[in-house]
Image (cartoon, rainbow, N blue to C red):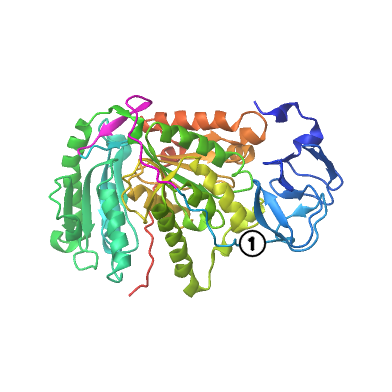
Amino acid sequence: MSDLLNLPAAENLVIRVRGDDNVAVARVPISEGQEIRTGGVVIHARSAVPVGHKVALEDIEAGAPVIRYGLIIGRARRPIRAGEHVHEHNLALETGSGTYDFPAEELHEVPPPESGPSFLGYPRPDGRAGTRNYVAVVAASNCAAFAAELAASRFPRESLPENVHGVAAFPHGYGCGTPVGPDLEQLRRTIGGILHHPNVAGVVVLGLGCEVNQIEAYLDGGDDRILGLTLQDAGGTRAAAEKAAEAIRGMMERAAATKRREEPAWKLVLGLQCGGSDAFSGITANPALGACCDRLVAAGGAIVLAETPETFGAENLLVRRARNRRVAEAYLAMVERYKAYLRPYGSTFEDNPSPGNKEGGLTNIVEKSLGAVAKAGTSPLMAAYEYAERITARGFVFMNTPGYDPVSLTGIAAGGANIIAFTTGRGSATGFPIVPVIKIASNSATYRRMREDMDVNAGAIADGEAAVEEIGREIFDLVLRVASGETTCSERLGHNEFVPWRIGPVL
């Protein structure tokens, strides 16, 4: 248990992550004049400090570093006195020097252990294992989106045979008016990742027939699990939906015949996401998820950190962990390309955090990123993947995605993640059609307020009721149970967001 339980009231007010931090985070709302004690420091609040916001523990000169997590999160815009509220009004962003500590030695991938934790999964012909068993109806373009939804609607959950989790529709707004080139390639990679996902037993791909994203792109592999139809050949929307439904019934019989069996935990690919972060995310939910990830990596599994904009300011933390310089440079190239991607629109990474993040106590993108990368634990960075690229490495890997939750989840899932862990401070209402998403609340207030959406309360750490490692173990155990069939809140609610990343112009 945390020592917070045994501290006097004044020392229960704030959380100081490291002994050399010159700011601490308010655990509860602090009133003007209230005494604050932490690590031998005694100060009085010079103004009210909202919950989750920072308070200065010492006088900080103008231009001097403001330190949280033992790292610089910015510099004082003006002199800050001990006891002052620290936020946008007096903290300026510092973007870093651009020099990196590249790894000096090569680290090699370690083979999975001969024994270890396991889960009950669905064996697939390519050697992967599913945590769910779906039949999917995927639209190749916006023109077939409604037909895909119409076909899936013929199969309500209560009518499904045992062992089939659902018929999942994948409508979206792209695929026509899309320029041939990187944008079309990325869309095809994303859709292809769904067609060949380990949680999918069979797929119908629907197109209109004349769109840019032709269904033939998905049918040249001779995979009898995939059937293609177009509305124009089938006789229209309703006729295509009927033919798709007929094909789905046949696929469902085969899906139902596939049973769960014991699979090693190294066949798990755990996607990592955070959304609606607050100042507690980097203290509770993200470190606890990191502890879970260290357990999974030790068992031979893969963990996928994403959200490129939300690593800005924390690049060196990832570069130092890279298995070699090539992986480090591949990741840094993704960051630079993302900056170039934003530039024509007058945007930068500094446009992140969101208003909700700031209300929750996060002042700038550096502070947000330093807390966000804690989700990935402490293991080496083994590979860097482009959006929706299939994940083949074990251990900790990175994927280039936006921070925008539904788009990031789509890329991670298309890359082959068969389970996702999602930390949130403000509360999140996002899931994915075929991949179970575990929601981890960073504070107890959000957990209680959104109980129907939250699976784990990491706020118990800030409350002094549990340690990071305890909640990490709780998450790891839940990952194995969910992988074996236990449903998550997002599944019970029916969340099914699928939003591919559109990177180019519309023609």
Does 118 appear in magenta? yes
What percent of the width, then of the height, locates residue 506? Answer: 35, 72
What percent of the width, then of the height, locates residue 412? Answer: 38, 49
Against 131, residue 366 (above or below) is below
Compared across the picture, whether 398 is left or right of 347 comes to left
Determine which quarter of the picture holds residue 13: top right
What percent of the width, then of the height, locates residue 197? Answer: 28, 45
| Quadrant into which the C terminus falls | bottom left
Q: Where are the magenta residues, as a range?
A: 105-125
Q: Main secondary structure of the magenta part?
A: loop
Q: Please name whichever residue, 229 or 362, is drawn nearer the observer in this view of the structure.
A: 362
Compared across the picture, whether 75 is left or right of 434 comes to right
Against 19, residue 61 (above or below) is below
In this figure, which residue is indicated by the disc labeled 1?
Answer: 94
Q: Please name whichever residue, 316 or 286, is drawn nearer the observer in this view of the structure.
A: 316
Instruction: Please give the name of the residue rendered at 37% of the width and 25% of the height, measured from the top-left corner.
Output: 116
Compared across the picture, whether 283 is left or right of 421 comes to right
Q: Amino acid at mark 1?
A: Glu
What percent of the width, then of the height, locates residue 96? Answer: 60, 61
